[in-house]
Amino acid sequence: MNALAATNRNFQLAARILGLDSKLHKSLLIPFREIKVECTVPRDDGSFVSYIGFRIQHDNARGPMKGGIRYHPEVDPDEVNALAQLMTWKTAVANLPYGGAKGGIGCNPRELTVSELQRVTRVFTQKIHDLIGIHRDVPAPDMGTNSQTMAWILDEYSKFHGYSPAVVTGKPIELGGSLGREAATGLGVVFATEFLLDEYGMSFANMKFAIQGFGNVGSWAASFIHQKGGKVVAVSDITGAVKNPNGIDIPALLKHKEKADSLKDFEGGDAMDLNDVLVHECDVLIPCALGGVLNKENAADVKAKFIIEAANHPTDPEADEILSRKGVTILPDIYANSGGVTVSYFEWVQNIQGFMWEEEKVNYELKRYMKRAFNDIKAMCHTHNCNLRMGAFTLGVNKVARATVLRGWEA
């Protein structure tokens, strides 16, 4: 099942639990605006190349739209639609005054030079500058983009609208980026895990963790778990996989990865098959990479008691049912990985105020926001007698539906 079908299915279930009016139900599903633009730029060799740029703006009932911009050769409109919709529910669950958006350019950033990437980014910004904005739609980095991409968007947008640091988040610190943004998603995952374990009277000490994906989110999550006394017994990324039943030395693994640009040949553990990390013997499994990694083929073999969805949509609906029958507790992506967008919100707030925070304050506020969202999800689970995924979806959908009705959507 693709990302859009799965997201729609979760939305339909939440709408049914909430007893949403059918007209409102339909209105919430349809994106507010879909933008598609042509981006033609000169290459360094003088030839011209054309790409399609797009932006899906899903909903703005609760505030400006928010979501990443990805550069990837196979940009699937369905997936982008699903991710824009997911951002609408995610920002509502996290109690941030935003709606959802997503976008990008159908190019392969690895095949472009830095100057070509800059030209593509600037042309894309020229085409959409009047449809994004501080109080309209605030982009952020995603797959294939980074803080440098955001710096170019900020510069190009500012040529039309005056200096506007709050138009994008995930910027370099020197241009108004927030301290703590880099680690935010990984730290948020660890806070979310802490609150969930707390419910069961457990803590990180002596718990075994398996982490699939060792990029930004996975590596930060592993570091914080290691610091809190948790045992990370298996780690994988596209370059390889490592296991150690006594716990991997995460600082040593990070040093090895920085030096070798790979997890292969790490001396502090044994190599293992990439796919076996998901079914490895552990208490907590944290998928931090791609969507759809837990499916009907491997769900029955999962040994973890808890799954923390640090990636977007890592669990297929079929796997969801198999895992819940096994009694596995799943903390859903729209809550578990919301640390990144929460600190993006803090960055936006700091830019609007022109007053920057210390990292300590950023992390303190992140924990406070994530704790409140966790309690809100628990309350929804209690009210509707449902699992955590439906608790989160009913919470998000209900907030957006309430805002839509209060604003007078039928007028």
Image (tube, rainbow, N blue to C red):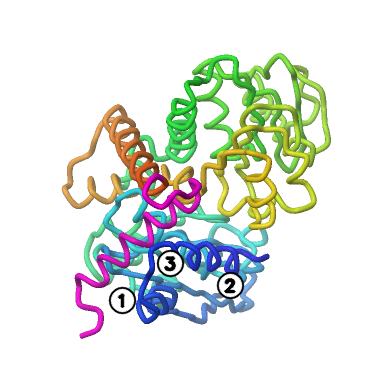
SS for dot 1: loop
Residues rendered magenta in the picture: 382-411
Determine the residue positioned at 48% across, 65% down.
11
SS for dot 2: helix
User: Mark 1 is on which residue type?
Assistant: Asp
Nearer to the camera, 342 or 8: 8
Residue 208, image x, y percentages:
64, 22
First of labels 3, 2 by sequence position: 3
**Distance between mark 3 and mark 2 Cα atoms:** 21 Å
Is residue 231 highlighted in magenta? no
Using the image, tell me which numbered label, if any, was put on residue 78.
2
Residue 181, image x, y percentages:
39, 40
Nearer to the camera, 394 or 28: 394
Residue 114, image x, y percentages:
55, 57
Residue 79 appears in the rendering: yes
Q: Is 53 located above or below residue 214 in the figure?
A: below
Residue occupied by mark 1: 130
User: Mark 3 is on which residue type?
Assistant: Ala
Q: Name the main secondary structure of what is drawn in magenta.
A: helix
Residue occupied by mark 3: 15
- CB atoms of marks 3 and 1 within 8 Å: no
Using the image, tell me which numbered label, if any, was put on residue 16.
none
- Position of the C terminus, as image quadrant, is bottom left
Determine the residue positioned at 52% across, 47% down.
332
First of labels 3, 1 by sequence position: 3
Viewer-nearest of discs 3 and 2:
3
Determine the residue positioned at 25% across, 66% down.
403
Where residue 123 sits, quadrant-wise, is bottom left
Residue 153 appears in the rendering: no
Residue 215, image x, y percentages:
60, 40
**Distance between mark 3 and mark 1 Cα atoms:** 33 Å
